[in-house]
């Protein structure tokens, strides 16, 4: 990939009096990925000014060296926040909080150090939509998923109409949970998240809070095309940390998530409490499934009971998994067979896409 010089990028800016977009990137020990992430920022074709803020959380590998090399090459574009002590270990959302506070842009775009943007028109298209819809503060799009070096994207996760955008309700985002929106796709109006409530720092993950707060005014606009790649369970990511089953850690994380969802409901004056109750019930299901995969049947039953008690019929998955508490081992094996068949379909979808692209 031949990158443009800083001078070439800046020369295309027609709007230089105001920073339109602040791109924030949080990274830790991601030397294998961070260069692709930065390149995804530098390929952006815009006629407006943007800045890149990279928060390195005291990495011990080559990540700081790679960031420094790019910062020296693009000094007007890239600002580095280099921590000498790991902040995530103090509070998981502290790196994001610090990066947001350092922004100057009218809009904030997020991409963590293991993901990357695949379209040079990504932020331009998102900003155009937000500028045309001043009542809406959040725009996102589809993402491709990268696992084991291969792009694996379910047909369910990519919209069929690739040229259109759609409007997504606030309640859909609340009910969808943190995985509803792919993090590297997010662009928010900075006014919606610049003054974050205190409970943000107590949340185990910041993505969901940012999504809900930025969508609270008028939902979100979704661009129905994949313009970023999300790495599944990559080194240094939250998902990789959660991959191995740990009952005590899961209990702490679940408790903190429920407290965060409840705090959001209260912060927004309990105007959408039904949606937040569904979100909590679905959060129990997420952690119940982790217990089931680890064959911790008692914990699986307990969490599904809590989910059903909190809000019945929160989702089809909740209903099916609650039925599974009657015969959990049988349910697990049936699910594994279903998962294997789904994987085959997804692989076929990927192969078909490859053939069509040739």
Image (cartoon, helix red, strand yellow):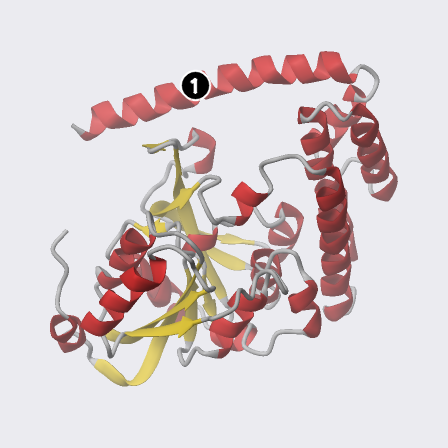
Give whichever of 256, 30 is nearer the camera.
30
Residue at the image point whose x is 41% and y is 71% from the top: 82
Q: Residue 83 location, x and y as percent?
A: 46, 71
Identify whether 177 is placed above or below 260: above
> In the rendered view, would you say 226 is above or below 192?
above
Q: Position of residue 60 (x, y in %)?
A: 42, 58
Image location (x, y in percent) of residue 152: 39, 31
Q: Nearer the viewer, residue 37 or 215?
A: 37
Q: Can the viewer see residue 271 in this picture?
A: no
Label 1 neighbour load within 10 Å: few <14, some 14-19, many 20+:
some
* Left or right of residue 355, residue 268 in this image: right
Q: Based on the displayed image, in which of its 4 quarters is residue 144 positioned? A: top left
Q: Residue at x 77, y 51 (%)?
A: 255
Is residue 32 visible to the viewer in this orientation of the structure? yes
Q: Secondary structure at mark 1?
A: helix
Residue 46 image point, x, y percent: 23, 68
Residue hosting label 1? 345
Give the quarter of the image for residue 161.
top left
Foreground: 67 or 17?
67
- Residue extending farthest to the right is 309
In this rendering, the answer to whether 314 lies above or below 298 is below
Q: Residue at x 50, y 20 (%)?
A: 342
Residue appearing at x 36%, y 19% in the figure: 348
Q: From the viewer's perspective, is 351 left or right of 234? A: left
Q: Quadrant of the C terminus?
A: top left
């Amino acid at each position: 990939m031949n990158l443009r010089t800083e001078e070439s990028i800046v020369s295309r800016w027609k709007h230089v009096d105001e920073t339109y977009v602040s791109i924030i990137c949080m990274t830790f020990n991601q030397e294998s990925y961070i260069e692709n992430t930065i390149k995804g920022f530098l390929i952006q074709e815009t006629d407006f000014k943007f800045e890149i803020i990279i928060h390195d959380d005291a990495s011990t590998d080559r990540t700081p060296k790679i960031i420094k090399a790019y910062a020296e090459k693009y000094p007007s574009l890239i600002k580095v926040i280099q921590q000498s002590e790991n902040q995530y270990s103090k509070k998981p959302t502290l790196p994001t909080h610090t990066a947001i506070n350092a922004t100057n842009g009218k809009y904030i775009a997020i991409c963590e150090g293991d993901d990357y943007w695949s379209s040079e028109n990504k932020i331009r298209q998102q900003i155009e939509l937000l500028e045309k819809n001043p009542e809406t503060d959040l725009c996102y799009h589809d993402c491709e998923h990268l696992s084991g070096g291969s792009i694996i994207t379910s047909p369910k996760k990519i919209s069929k109409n690739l040229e259109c955008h759609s409007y997504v309700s606030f309640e859909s985002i609340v009910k969808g949970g943190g995985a509803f929106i792919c993090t590297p796709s997010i662009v928010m109006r900075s006014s919606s998240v610049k003054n974050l409530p205190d409970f943000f720092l107590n949340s185990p993950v910041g993505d969901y809070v940012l999504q809900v707060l930025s969508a609270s005014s008028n939902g979100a606009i979704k661009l129905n095309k994949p313009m970023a790649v999300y790495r599944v369970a990559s080194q240094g990511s939250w998902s990789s940390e959660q991959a191995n089953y740990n009952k005590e850690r899961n209990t702490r994380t679940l408790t903190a998530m429920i407290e965060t969802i409840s705090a959001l409901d209260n912060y927004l004056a309990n105007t959408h409490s039904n949606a937040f109750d569904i979100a909590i019930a679905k959060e129990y299901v997420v952690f119940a499934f982790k217990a089931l995969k680890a064959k911790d049947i008692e914990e699986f039953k307990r969490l599904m009971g809590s989910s059903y008690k909190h809000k019945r019929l929160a989702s089809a998955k909740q209903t099916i998994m609650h039925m599974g508490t009657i015969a959990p081992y049988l349910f697990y094996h049936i699910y594994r067979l279903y998962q294997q068949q789904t994987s085959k379909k997804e692989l076929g979808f990927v192969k078909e896409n490859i053939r069509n692209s040739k």
